[in-house]
Image (cartoon, grey):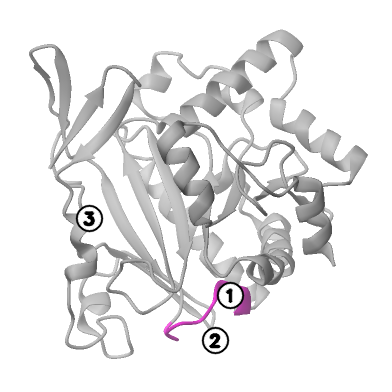
Amino acid sequence: MEWRKCTLTNQWYLVGAKDIEMNNVKFDNCPFCPGGEYSNAYKIDEINNGNDHVVCIPNPQKSLIVEEKIKRVGIGFFDMMNNIGADEIIMETQHEHKPFSQFSEEHLALVFKMFARRIDDLKNDDRFRHVIAYRNQSEYTGSPFQHPFSRIMAFPMVPKIIDNELFEARKHFVRKDRCLFCDIIAEEIRTRVRIVVENKEFVAFCPYASRFPYEVWVAPVHHSSSFEKDMQGNILSKLAEIMSMLLPKVEKVASSYFLALHTSPNEKSAAFKNHQWETLQDDYHWHIEITPKYLFADYIERRSGYIANSVLPEKAAEEMRS
């Protein structure tokens, strides 16, 4: 396995990944049930409030290696790196098949607290330019794990979708001396037609140019570039509160969805030291994106490069509010 860069798109792709074959892996018994040996033997971190137990472990089918140094190689005209990175699984509960929408606020807070702890820890490694956290809610995920879980991955590059956000946020900040996301959030609060739920610290809304039916973003009303630095006290509890309000509404319209955390790149990486993101704390704004899965939308996007969304975000928000 190795990272290869496409010169046309300026994107890096992991080629030859074992993770593609995860659905072929079989376990005699679930390794993460009470008494499962794997989670006990390879535990990275855990949080237990007496009722709920969240555990972080290395991904048994990891495609990335954390132990080696980065090796950047030119192969003729092309660029390649070894498969450096981190790949971790957050086992959210010991109860199999439990939907995220059925987690209590206290339980959701534990999951997000674990996100923050793992992201903060991985960002101490200056090889990693970006750390992502995501969750795949689906009847079939292609995973051998029966437990609800999230995934934390650290990369030696910034994913293209985040890189695009950084570029537009920086451009907006240079032109207007304001955070682009703060301006978007202010407009959503002003018009209110795309808001699904909100509380004192967060707002959940269907974005104006939604890519998918019932797509929802969750963002802090206050400015903050870094999720992991924000997850303290009242902010953590208010995030759990709004997610507890929102997730049942999402699962009402889509049984399968993808949840992704967008947070700032690693300020300790070599790229940051070279002043690539010198206004990062002022211009970027962390948020969570929830994208329900619809095969037709995926078909159009993958084959044409254009997005076709059949549901107006205003109608989607109205339906989810009801």
Would residue 63 be counted in the magenta stretch? no
- Regarding residue 120, the answer to whether it shows in the image is no
Q: Check disc 2 and give the amino acid type.
A: Asn
Mark 3 and mark 1: Cα distance apart in space: 30 Å
Relative placement, left or right, of 229 versus 272 is: right
Residue holding disc 2: 51
Residue extending farthest to the top is 175
For the residues bearing labels 1 and 2, Cβ distance under 8 angstroms: yes
Callout 2: few (<14), some (14-19), or many (20+) C-alpha neighbours within 10 Å? few
- The answer to which of marks 3 and 2 sits earlier in the sequence is 3
Circle nearer the viewer, 3 or 2: 3
Residue drawn at x 22%, y 64% is 22
Q: Earlier in the sequence, mark 3 or mark 1?
A: 3
Please identify, in this view, whether the residue under mark 1 or under mark 2 is nearer the observer: 1
How far apart marks 1 and 2 lie (CA) works out to: 8 Å
Mark nearest the camera among 3 and 1 is 3
Q: Is residue 320 left or right of residue 48?
A: right
Question: What whole-number distance in Å separates the C-alpha atoms at marks 3 and 2?
Answer: 35 Å
Q: Quarter of the image containing the N terminus?
A: top left
Residue 129 is left or right of residue 244, and the answer is: left
Which residue is label 1 attached to?
Answer: 107
Give above or below for 279 relative to 85. Answer: above
Span of residues in magenta: 94-102
Residue 147 location, quadrant: bottom left
| Secondary structure mainly formed by the magenta segment | loop
Question: Could you say which is closer to the camera, residue 22 or residue 165?
Answer: 22
Q: Position of residue 144 (x, y in %)?
A: 27, 73
According to the image, label 3 marks what residue?
20
Residue 192 located left or right of residue 173: right
Near mark 3 (Cα within 10 A), the count class, few <14, some 14-19 or many ≥20, is few
